[in-house]
Amino acid sequence: MFTNRLQKVYKHISKLARRQDIACYRFYDHDLPEFPFIIEMYKDVIYATYKRKHGLEDAENEQWEQECKEVISSVTEVPSENIFMKPRQRKTDRQDTVTTQKEERIVPEDGLSFIVNLTDYLDTGLFLNDRSLRAKVRSEAQGMKVLNLFCYTGAFSLFAAGGGAEEIVSVDFSKTYLNWGKRNMQYNKLFKDEKHHFIQADVMEWIATELPADYFDIIICDPPSFAKGKGRDDDFDVQRDHVKLLKQLLKGCSDTGRIYFCTNSKDFVMERDSIPATTVKDITGAITPFDFQGKLTRSCYLIEK
């Protein structure tokens, strides 16, 4: 059952990827409940995460995992040693690590190169579902001042640099991910100290106290669905607080500035009438990559000042 389904989806998705010269893509996403995997290709290696099957002892789970790895290897012709597999556990924030093996690879996307880590974190450092939006940001970045909030490993910042942005500010709470983002810039020989600023800060606090007025031409904001603050009144809920957040960001936009606002909250509803902008447009369908069609629970909006 798993073999047949995997053969079908891999043949279809990999063919589309080759036609578009895409080396990193997702080709299986919980297609069968008995095999609850997310499986992604990163050039010539595979990264597979799964929800552990309840009721299996450790030895039974290891055997099941090995059998599944053999099926994936057989279907994709990727050697087992190049298939990295781990259970996907509930996490409280992005900074949770799984191991410290530091198995890194360099993978291409649209003419740029990214460092991905296949062992140490719950995610690789490159969110494949943002591929189309990254390309859009690059196409608009020439001569622009760009702000990347909750920037993670700086993929949007790298694409903005590749597109010729005048200045890029990347803000995240994690020093680890900011350093990773800087390494991505340096590997691509794009980093310029006077133009590219990586700021470690509580992002909400930075927005409230440091965001310059009428300054940025493009802002990318991908906040957590929920985050605990320093005090009881500082907790962030994207549904409850997005209007306040977007009003703050609009003040930081230039006269022709725009915001790309994304959220993974499944039941998110944009309160359009409460946002003082000329445009509030749901662009989710337009920027959903082919390998996420029908699978993406993420929403993305274009807000123009």
Image: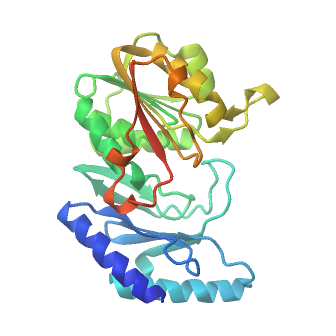
Picture quadrant where residue 295 is located:
bottom left
Q: Answer left or right for 52 relative to 109.
A: right
Q: Nearer the viewer, residue 153 or 223?
A: 223
Q: Is residue 112 above or below residue 305?
A: below
At x 28%, y 39%, the residue is: 136
In percent of width and height, residue 236 lies at 68, 33
Residue 144, quarter of picture: top left
Q: Is residue 121 above or below residue 205?
A: below
- Count of marks placed on residues: 0
Relative height, residue 47 to residue 8 (above, below): above
**Quick check: can you spot residue 201?**
no
Could you tell me which residue is drawn at 53 percent across and 89 percent down? 67
Residue 210: x and y, percent? 54, 15
Residue 288 at what x, y percent from top left?
A: 36, 51
Quarter of the figure with residue 22: bottom left
Direction right: furthest residue: 232
The residue sitting at 61% across, 89% down in the picture is 63
Residue ranking furthest to the front: 273
